[in-house]
Image (tube, rainbow, N blue to C red):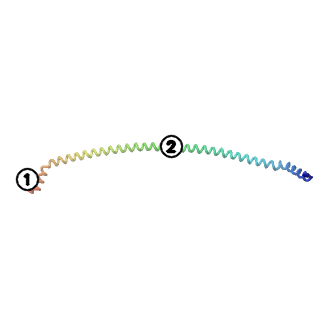
Amino acid sequence: MDLDLTFVIQLAIFLTLLGGLTPVVLRPFQKVIDERENKTRGARAEASRLESLADQDRTAYQARIDEGRAAASRERDALRSSGRAQEREIISEARGEVLAVLGKSREEIEAAETTARASLDADQGVLAAALVEKVLGRKVA
């Protein structure tokens, strides 16, 4: 390997440019890259924090929804029970009224039957005589 003067000159130019360009180009470029990396890390950390908050909010929301559903279910069951109790009460009252009307109707029918029997018993002789008279065609004494 021959080292000649051009190699030494090229090496000197390279080192001079490297020394001169490092503070002007390379350091600011490295700063930009580092800042971008820091911002990316910060954004990722913020996104992770926001995702965690969203999970907490979602969990709290679901808990409130479940609580609301449970309360609505309890209220619905209470209303059903109340409705069924009212239904039984109304049916019981209606049954009582029907039985009272039925009893009254039976009493009226029995009274009418008794009156009719008494009337028929009283008119029995007259009706029998009229029937015999019709059948025989003459008056019976």
Left or right? Give the position of 86 relative to 115.
Answer: right
Residue 29 rendering spot, x and y as whole percentages: 79, 49
Left or right? Give the position of 131 relative to 13.
Answer: left
Left or right? Give the position of 141 relative to 33.
Answer: left
Task: For marks 2 and 1, give the CA distance.
Answer: 93 Å
Q: Which residue is mark 2?
A: 70
Residue 71 rendering spot, x and y as whole percentages: 50, 42
Which of the two discs, 2 and 1, sits closer to the camera? 2
Q: Which mark is residue 59?
A: none
Question: In the depicted view, which residue is nearer to us: 123 or 46?
Answer: 46
Q: Which residue is mark 1?
A: 140
Secondary structure of the residue carrying numbered label 2: helix
Left or right? Give the position of 119 relative to 76.
Answer: left
Disc 1 residue type? Val
* Label 2 vs 1, first from the N-terminus: 2
Disc 2 residue type? Ala
Secondary structure of the residue carrying numbered label 1: loop
Q: Residue at x 61, y 44 (%)?
A: 55
Residue 12 rendering spot, x and y as whole percentages: 89, 50
